[in-house]
Amino acid sequence: MSLSSNPPDASSPARRVRWLIFAGVFAVALAFAAFTDHAWEDYYITYRVSKNLATGHGLVYTVGERVHAFTSPLNVLVPAALSILTGNRSDELVLWLFRVLSSALLAGAAVLLYESARSNYLSRLATAVLIGMFAFDAKIVDFSINGQEIAFMMFFLALALHVLTVRSDWTILKLGLAGAGLMWTRPDGFIYFGALGIGFLLFDAGRPIGQSRLGLLKVFVWAGALTTVLYLPWLLWAWHYFGSPIPHTIIAKGQLKFASAMEPAQRLLRCLGFPFGMLVGRTSVGATFLPANALLFGGWHWTVVLFGKTLACLCGLYWCVPRGRPQGRAASFAFMVGHFYLSCIAAYAAAWYLPACAILGIFAFAHMMQHALDLASSVPDPRRIQARYWRTCIRAASAIVVLGTLLLLVGSAYQLRVQQREIEDGTRKQIGLWLREHAASPTDTVFLEPLGYVGFFSQLKMLDTPGLCAPEVVAAERKLKSISLPKIIPEVHPDWLVLRPAEADQIRAAVPGLLTETYSAVKVFDASERIASYRWLPGRAYLRYDEKWIVFKRHASPPQTKASLDSRFGTRTFLPSTLLPM
């Protein structure tokens, strides 16, 4: 134990620190929300379901169609409850109340991490790194205030880490609640819960809790049983209501797998080589601590990418250190398992999935810093000068990491402020309002990829790709064994198309007459000049990808026969930005 370590206590100064951490993280999250006003595209997918529930139409995206068009139970039920409590008067008020609640959960997660740090003798420096990285992580903060479910994910993962590292008479109950909370937050929550369990068992990191590996295993078995009991009611109800226990969003995303399917031998090799792949391969690891989609679209300085990838690799490989701190190694191993799931099993590593790995990496990195401090303190007395030198280097490295994380948060905040103003409110929302005004009836169908803003503000029938709310699209993809837009569109015969120029060009190349003989361009929404007017804009390419949209309307005359279109199909496949693997 380092001489600078701080044992836990219940003194008044410690209580003040807890309140300061809570207030600080809460303020950072709300300040980020106020500055950016960012509302993520997918929030409006879920909120359309929430609003239908709150207004008596059921837990559905399109009234009258029981489609499980959301993934997180909490992320649909909490906004619905807030809408009911506010009398369904203001969608903006619901979003802000949800932001306040999420900010409080994020702050509570930070306090739980602090308690775990103090109970396990992390020094003030290591604790500051832990709380600083967590409070300033760009994706953790953004996806906690932009309408996504990440604040819930952070709270329940922090609770699991707290339970596994701090003694309590209620360990099984609290761990079961953490597991159930993760499942109610996202159906893949068991992946991270299980990864933590394997990590703590593998490195014997739960000895203070379970006394032995066998004791800890019993704790996990009982906690798992409690998790099942607490989550089972939702699973059974969803099965009854929607006809399947599996969210339709997961089924639709699963359609993407055949586009890049691997042979079993390839999958096995990738599994065995994943630790090495984190260093050289194309995995989700490098994006962990970077702003959303920074690697996918670029536009950030190369030093930012180097910073994020180096930090993530250190977190992902600390479990390999033979004499590392067991709890840090366990979290590091869970970090790697989480990324293996996102990179090799999940349909794609969406930006809002990464914070679940980030909190594990941050926890591991704090223990890594404490390990380095302990090594420096163990240097014999004759080499005190060298020990002081190494401690100074460790402090400097810690300061660089926290400061770098803060600078990325600031840069991301500016980028998202512009994105919200020019892309979300200035373009996609306007497309939805325009379609609502010009549609022949509420049953008009719209084919597009970005379902959120356009779907919510138009309130029309959406035929999205890959079919998150549209079983018709999933059925067409299965029938055609393709996710190619030129093939899917004639199969589902939408009344409207909302396409990026690149998508329209792909369709013209594959089926030259589809966008002239069957559809006509009727409106262009173009924010390119506004985006170009910003002299400094980190991650500009991310905004440019969505800066221009073309709306097509189907002709009143009957469409071409499918046989004549099939004869002209190309083979190219387009994967939209939110669906590309990271």
Image (cartoon, rainbow, N blue to C red):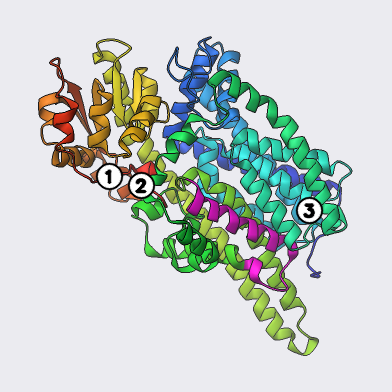
Q: Are marks 2 and 3 in contact (CB under 8 Å)?
A: no
Which element type, helix, strand or loop, lies under badge 1?
Answer: loop
Most frequent secondary structure within the magenta stretch: helix
Q: What's the CA distance linking mark 1 and mark 3?
A: 48 Å
**Sequence-first tag of 2 and 3:** 3
Q: What's the CA distance linking mark 2 and mark 1?
A: 8 Å
Q: Quadrant of the N terminus?
A: bottom right
| 455 relative to 523 in the view: left or right | right
Instruction: Pick whichever, 532 or 75, lies toward us.
Output: 75
Q: Residue at x 75, y 58 (%)?
A: 201
Residue highlighted by disc 3:
165
Q: Is residue 415 visible?
A: no
- Residue 580 lies in the magenta-colored region: no
Report the amino acid beneath label 2: Ala
Residue highlighted by disc 2:
259
Q: Which of the labelled discs sits on residue 15, or is there none?
A: none
> What range is drawn magenta here?
318-346
x and y, in percent, of residue 449 in the image: 33, 34
Residue highlighted by disc 1:
573
> Image height check: is 366 above or below 490?
below
> Image height check: is 570 above or below 5?
above
Report the amino acid beneath label 3: Thr
